[in-house]
């Protein structure tokens, strides 16, 4: 998956410009983004501050690691149950 060209801080800066009264079309043209991207950013980061966005990114990473650990644990349990069923 391709990463964003913009950091969370830059995205929040663009959203703050819009909150300050800049026209959405002009803002999108100036920053080189589509209006759909702007509205997706607004849905995700609207009302956040920079430290909130950093914390969100950190929690998303931690959540991904925990999901991976859970999947590995479930796979180990499945393999062990299959071995017990064959030996028992």
Image (cartoon, rainbow, N blue to C red):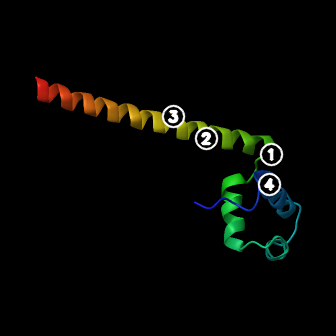
Say few, some or many: other residues with alpha carbon within 10 Å of mark 4 (under 14 / 14 to 19 / 20 or more). Answer: many
Question: Height in image: 20 above or below 65?
Answer: below
Q: Residue at x 33, y 36 (%)?
A: 75
| Disc nearer the start of the sequence (1/4) | 4
Question: Height in image: 7 above or below 80?
Answer: below
Q: Residue at x 40, y 35 (%)?
A: 72
Q: Residue at x 19, y 29 (%)?
A: 83
| Disc nearer the start of the sequence (3/2) | 2
Between the C-alphas of marks 2 and 1, the distance is: 17 Å
Q: Residue at x 80, y 54 (%)?
A: 12
Element at badge 4?
Answer: helix
- Pinpoint residue 25: horizontal percent, then vertical percent: 79, 76
Check whether the beta carbons of the residues at disc 1 and disc 4 lie within 8 A of each other: yes
| Disc nearer the start of the sequence (4/2) | 4
Say which residue label 3 marks: 66
Between the C-alphas of marks 1 and 3, the distance is: 25 Å
Element at badge 2?
Answer: helix
Q: In front here: 56 or 75?
A: 75
Question: Dividing the image into 4 quarters, which one contains the N terminus?
Answer: bottom right
Residue at the limit of the structure toward the top, as seen here: 88
Say which residue label 2 marks: 61
Say few, some or many: other residues with alpha carbon within 10 Å of mark 3 (under 14 / 14 to 19 / 20 or more). Answer: few
Quadrant hosting residue 13: bottom right
- Pinpoint residue 28: horizontal percent, then vertical percent: 79, 73
Say which residue label 4 marks: 12
Element at badge 3?
Answer: helix
Q: Nearer the viewer, mark 4 or mark 2?
A: 2
Is 23 positioned to the left or the right of 36 in the image?
Answer: right
Is 26 positioned to the left or the right of 75 in the image?
Answer: right
Between the C-alphas of marks 4 and 3, the distance is: 28 Å
Between the C-alphas of marks 3 and 2, the distance is: 9 Å
Say which residue label 1 marks: 50
């Amino acid at each position: 998956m391709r990463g964003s060209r913009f950091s969370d801080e830059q995205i929040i800066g663009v959203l703050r410009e819009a909150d300050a009264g800049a026209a959405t079309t002009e803002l999108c043209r100036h920053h080189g983004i589509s209006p759909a991207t702007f509205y997706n950013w607004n849905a995700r980061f609207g009302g956040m501050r920079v430290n909130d966005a950093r914390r969100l990114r950190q929690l998303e990473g931690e959540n991904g690691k925990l999901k991976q650990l859970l999947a590995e644990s479930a796979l180990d349990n499945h393999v062990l149950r299959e071995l017990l069923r064959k030996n028992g």
